[in-house]
Amino acid sequence: MANITIKNIPEKLYRQVKASAAAHHRSVNSEVIVCLEKALTARPVDSDSFLAEVRALRASLGKLRVTGRELGLAKRSGRP
């Protein structure tokens, strides 16, 4: 198995990896390997299945319609 050394990891990123490793009951090394596998492993998307899921979700929402004005107000709500 190959080894790799990663230098100059930003402290904030290291803390995030360490916290994630603890949450998953893994070592930091194992957590980094899992993160790399997730990031680099291609997952083919079946477009027909994806579209079927989207259509089913849309149908479950009924006739929910949002206007551009309502969307803009929602985006700005709670902002100074």
Image (cartoon, rainbow, N blue to C red):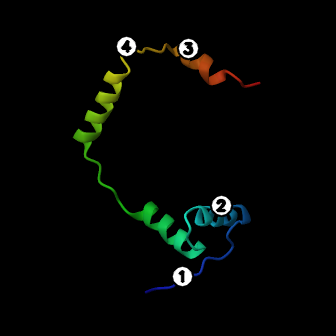
Badge 3 amino acid: Glu
Instruction: Give me the C-alpha separation between circle 2 and circle 3.
Output: 36 Å
Residue identifier under label 2: 16
Residue at (54, 70) in percent of width and height: 32
- Pinpoint residue 41: horizontal percent, then vertical percent: 38, 63
* Quadrant of the image occupied by residue 38: bottom left
Q: Nearer the viewer, residue 52 or 9?
A: 52
- Disc 4 or 1, which lies upstream in sequence? 1
- Disc 2 or 3, which lies upstream in sequence? 2
Residue identifier under label 3: 70
- Pinpoint residue 39: horizontal percent, then vertical percent: 46, 61
- Disc 1 or 2, which lies upstream in sequence? 1
**Along the horizontal axis of the image, is 68 left or right of 41?**
right
**Residue contact between numbered discs 2 and 3, judged by CB atoms under 8 Å:** no
Residue identifier under label 1: 4
Badge 1 amino acid: Ile
- Secondary structure under tag 4 reads loop
Foreground disc of the pair 4, 1: 4
Within-10-Å neighbours for mark 4: few <14, some 14–19, many 20+? few
Instruction: Give me the C-alpha separation between circle 4 and circle 1.
Output: 53 Å
> Above or below — where is 77 with respect to 8?
above
Residue at (67, 66) in percent of width and height: 14
Within-10-Å neighbours for mark 3: few <14, some 14–19, many 20+? few
